[in-house]
Image (tube, rainbow, N blue to C red):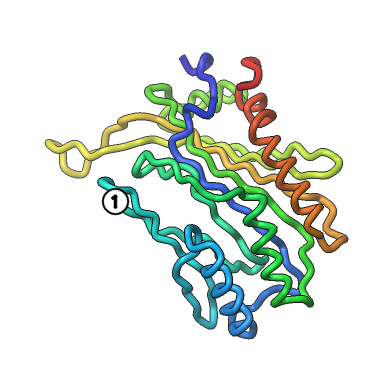
Amino acid sequence: MAEAFKFSKTKIADHMEKVGVDIRPVVEPKLDREKLYNVGSKLVDKYPNLFESLVQSPTEFRITKRFIFPGKGEAELNTLTITQRGPVFTFPRIVGAFEEEVSLNSVEDVTVDCLNVFRDIFPEKKMIRLGLVNDYIFDTGPIDSVRLISQRFTKLPVSTEGEIRLRINQPNDDYNRIIDIWALRKVEPIPEMPGKLQTQGYAVRVNVDFNNRDTSIDLDNNRILGILHDGKGYNEKELYQFLNVCFGEE
């Protein structure tokens, strides 16, 4: 069974898309407090469907958004976080807890627009690397994900009670294409056996980080759009060719 499993978009149970930018000199929440507030305020006004509440302290800056799924519940997610490396934008695509797809603006358009706001307020900063990161959870149903990964990508005999995680970089001349793969289990408590859990299903988590290798230049809008376009193309086609190995593309 494991050998025949085919990764495809229809198997995606959860999907978060992120865009992270490496900034130099680094952004410091304490020293850049006022500028960050100005960035956040402009983004909240411009994209209320993605940015809602500012969270700011001397050590952190982030913006959250409450996504409401009628009849199911709600989820508050960080949609912009300032890390030690720079801003990270998060675009929820499929929220697995509610089995809901989220419809948002184009990642390319929003990213370029938001980074232009950032540049206007931080003209001294350089953007040297941009990474498009897609975090997927593929539902494998009853197929043991540890066995699936070990059989497809290694020659290691891994017990189904064990763990496996792989990290592969397939760089080309322009980009790092880093894929993290690891096995997940869906577990539930056994009502008649307190403290005991039973496996209800399996999944494979795949994290894809597509970023530019050359960090010697300040990225302009055309270069940013090029990275995002090429990264999207990789996730649409080549990723599935890699995951499915001998099964071909999706």
Quarter of the image for residue 83 reads bottom right
Q: How many marks?
A: 1
Residue 186 lies left or right of residue 215; in this view the side is left
User: As shown in the figure, which amino acid type bears the numbered disc 1?
Assistant: Gly
Q: Name the foreground residue: 150 vs 211.
A: 211
Residue that carries the numbered disc 1 in the rendered image: 73
Q: Which x, y percent locates residue 20?
A: 65, 57
- From this view, report whether residue 71 is shown above or below residue 112: above
Viewer-proximal residue, 178 or 87?
87
Q: Residue 84, relative to residue 94: is it above or below?
A: below
- Tell me: 81 left or right of 218: left
Q: Residue 210: image x %, image y %?
A: 70, 45
Position of residue 192 measured from the top left corner of the image (x, y, whole percent): 12, 36
Q: Secondary structure at mark 1?
A: strand
Question: Residue at (83%, 58%) from the top-left corner?
Answer: 215
- For the point 77% across and 64% down, which residue is it? 127
Judge from the rendering whether residue 214 lies leftward or rightward of residue 80; answer left or right. Answer: right
Query: Looking at this rendering, what residue extends furthest in the front direction?
Result: 46
Above or below — where is 147 with respect to 34? above
The quadrant holding residue 208 is top right
Q: Residue at x 54, y 26 (%)?
A: 8
Q: In the drawing, does residue 76 fall left or right of residue 239?
A: left
User: Where does the C terminus fall, quadrant-wise?
Assistant: top right
Residue at figure coordinates x 85%, y 53% from the top left: 214
Classed neighbour count for the residue bearing mark 1: other residues with Cα under 10 Å, few (<14), some (14–19), many (≥20): few
